[in-house]
Image: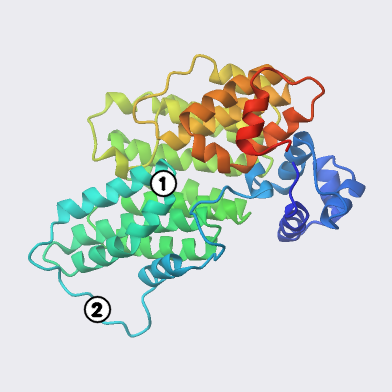
Amino acid sequence: MANEDLGRTLRRLRRLASLTQEELAERSGVSVDVIRQLEQQRKHSARLPTLHALANGLGVELTTLLGDPPAVTTTGENDGPRFVAMRRAVMPALWSPDPEPPGPGFSLDQLREQIADGWTQYHSAEFDTVMKALPDLIADARSATAADDAKAGYAALAKVLQLAGHVAVRMGKTDLALIALERAIAAAGDSADPLLPAMVVNSVAWAYQRQGRLQDALHVALHAAGTVRDGGHTGTADGLKVWGALTMSAATSAARSGDYDRAAGLMEGAEKEAARVSKLPAGGDSRMVSVFSPSSVRIERVRLAVQYGHPEDALTLAKGMRLSKDTPPSWRTWLLLDVARAHTDLGDAPGAVKTLESLRRVAPTWMQHHTLAVAIVRDLWSLPNHPPGLRSLAEFLGVGE
């Protein structure tokens, strides 16, 4: 992977983890000399196995080290007018007037539908479209809290602020994300939905993971999952989905902290419970509830297996997998990328190319901007023998030019 920012990112993540270069070398198995050369930008590239090892030593996702794909098209300004508008919507200025009740043409059902559509667009990686809509959606939801059915208004406000938090994470603005999510939790507490606070906590755990706060992420996810279970909510489809998503989040944090046994136990428990979802009465709009199904659990198990050095297990888990119809497109694309990683780690270049060709058909724009997809193709391109189809992929991603 050639990346002029790799060294700076590595140094920043190492310092955030309070590790010396020698300590990171011991944790990752990568020599101090390689780490030093990368950080001093005397070396601008590293093979995928080295990057995997460094990411695991730092306790972060590989994409955190490589740099996330651009979430929203920009002109080079991270805080351009559209992003400023989102900030103002999430954090109104001091002494702003209280929200006015909505006008006569307002429909709470229509607002809910628009927010649900926003979540669908988010899961389809249409981040630019979501960002355009967020300021008005947040403003409408705030107005809805001043209407007669205030609790329903607060529920809408919680879900749209949660959506804003997710977009902020994708933009690399985790501090803004946590502000949005904390306000979403407050709004959820004023709603009549007992599951809403726990749903938002799952997003908080994800934001903590992105900041390297793995123990904090593990704690809040397990606490919220326990609250859902102890409240008797796992007897409903929606409640079980919320519990399951929190449990998978806790497993991810445990794995990144090096506690693979605990992570495996949590994922096994989640997979067992996921089989009950389809047997329970249908819940609310699936676009507005946590993602949890046998398919999502298996996808997450594949991700953890490939991330922590078990590519054979990853391919075994992925083989013959049939995805449920409610699996979001973003989860499907991640599965293909992880399978391609597993093939690459095993030295199966033809298998990796075949999987990447499928990914290109399913999500060409997403793939073109994804740093990990580019890294995999770079690694394959460096091999002496190129399998059929690799040249087309390399040209598509601008590799090997």
Place of residue 40 in the rendered image (x, y in percent of width and height, measured from the top left): 86, 58
Q: Quadrant of residue 315?
A: top right
Residue that carries the numbered disc 2 in the rendered image: 98
Image point (45%, 49%), residue name: 202
Decide: is 102 above or below 250.
below
Residue 167 visible from this viewpoint: yes
Place of residue 213 in the rendered image (x, y in percent of width and height, measured from the top left): 61, 55
Q: Amino acid at mark 1?
A: Glu
Q: Amino acid at mark 2?
A: Asp
Q: Which residue reaches farthest left? A: 104
Image point (40%, 66%), residue name: 86
Q: Answer with mark 2 or mark 1, whichever residue precedes in sequence.
A: 2
**Color scheme of the displayed model:** rainbow
Q: Quadrant of residue 105?
A: bottom left
Of 147 and 40, nearer the camera is 40
Left or right: 31 with respect to 378? right
In the rendered image, which quarter contains the C terminus?
top right
**Please, what secondary structure does the residue beneath circle 2 have?**
loop
Task: Check disc 1: other Cα within 10 Å, few if <14, some if 14-19, many if 20+.
Answer: some
Left or right: 237 with respect to 332? left
Residue that carries the numbered disc 1 in the rendered image: 126
Distance from the alpha carbon under mark 2 to that under mark 1: 32 Å
